[in-house]
Image (spheres, rainbow, N blue to C red):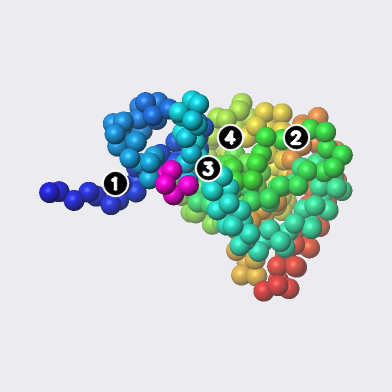
Amino acid sequence: MEEKNPIQVSERIFHTIECLAKYGPMGLLELSKELNLNKSTVHRILNSLIFMDYVKQDPETSKYSLSFKFCHISNQILAQNNMIDIARPYIKELAEQTGETVHLVQMDGINAVYIDKVEASKNSVRLVSMVGKSIPLYCSGVGKALLADMSDDKIQHIWEQSDIRKLTDYTVTDFDKFKKIIASIRKDGYSLDNEENELGVRCIAVSLKDYRGKSHYAISISAPKDRMSDEQLKNFQKLILQIKDQIQWEMGQRH
């Protein structure tokens, strides 16, 4: 009897989890079509995940969905990240100073992942960003801030690995133009996202270097474009650069 490929089995399990995470509650037939697997195979996978409390089935609709166990795991992962504890007081201060939303991200391959978010108490507009969400490096303020600290060869490698496409009319998809933007970031010390990732939203961002001079994190101030004029950006620029220095000093003290 031919043994099952353990890698294939694991791959199918994780694809099932990813599919449920992407689309939400799904029926067995719907899930089987999406995964391109027969119903009996998907049913076995789901039963295993239910047994381990990673998936639950609605008794009324019979649809399957992920359990809150994944939230517990993600919270444990974030709890192990010392950078969140270090940066939180500073990004909270920055949010109150600006009255806008401040994000902390960590680099993850060709993407950046939101690992913390603070919204000012007086902010009446809520952005769609959320902790755990990934955003491409090439079209985000935080991503470009991180890229600017890399070598040109590394930037080109990430560009070639990325799915370069216009998310908005303002997304830069020409590499020569992108290189000029990176050069400006290196000169100015901060990056901008002028509706390149999301229409109607502007961001200003800076990278955070650790004691070895490596940049794995970045922070940004994000706001609707009507609240982030060029004149307002000048004020935000001063504040975010000050906070960057303070966070990096704190990082050095804790090393």
Foreground: disc 3 or disc 1: 3
Q: Amino acid at mark 1?
A: Gln
Q: For mark 1, does the 10 Å Cα neighbourhood hold few (<14), some (14 to 19), or many (20 or more) residues?
A: few
- Marks 2/3 in contact by CB < 8 Å: the verdict is no
Secondary structure at numbered mark 4: loop
Residue underneath mark 4: 172
> Where residue 45 sits in the image (x, y, percent)?
35, 41
Bounds of the magenta span? 49-53
Q: Is residue 7 above or below residue 40?
A: below
Closer mark to the observer between disc 4 and disc 2: 2
Q: Where 215 falls versus 163 (above or below)?
A: below
Q: Position of residue 239 (x, y in %)?
A: 83, 52
**Residue at the (75%, 68%) spot, across then down:** 249
Q: Earlier in the sequence, mark 4 or mark 2?
A: 2
Q: Which residue is mark 1?
A: 8
Count of marks overlaid on the render: 4
Q: Residue at x 62, y 35 (%)?
A: 197
Of the numbered discs in the image, which one, if any, rests on residue 67? 3
Q: CA distance from mark 3 to mark 4?
A: 38 Å
Q: Secondary structure at mark 2?
A: loop
Front-lying residue, 207 or 153: 207
Confirm whether residue 34 shows in the render.
Answer: no
**C-alpha span from label 2 to label 1:** 41 Å
Give the residue at mark 2: 126
Pointer 3 local density, CA inside 10 Å: few below 14, some 14–19, many at least 20: some
Q: How far from the left and from the top, in percent, is residue 218?
A: 66, 53
The residue most toward the left is 1
Kindly identify the residue that appears in the image at 60 percent across and 32 percent down: 171
Q: Give the amino acid at mark 2.
A: Arg
Q: Amino acid at mark 4?
A: Val
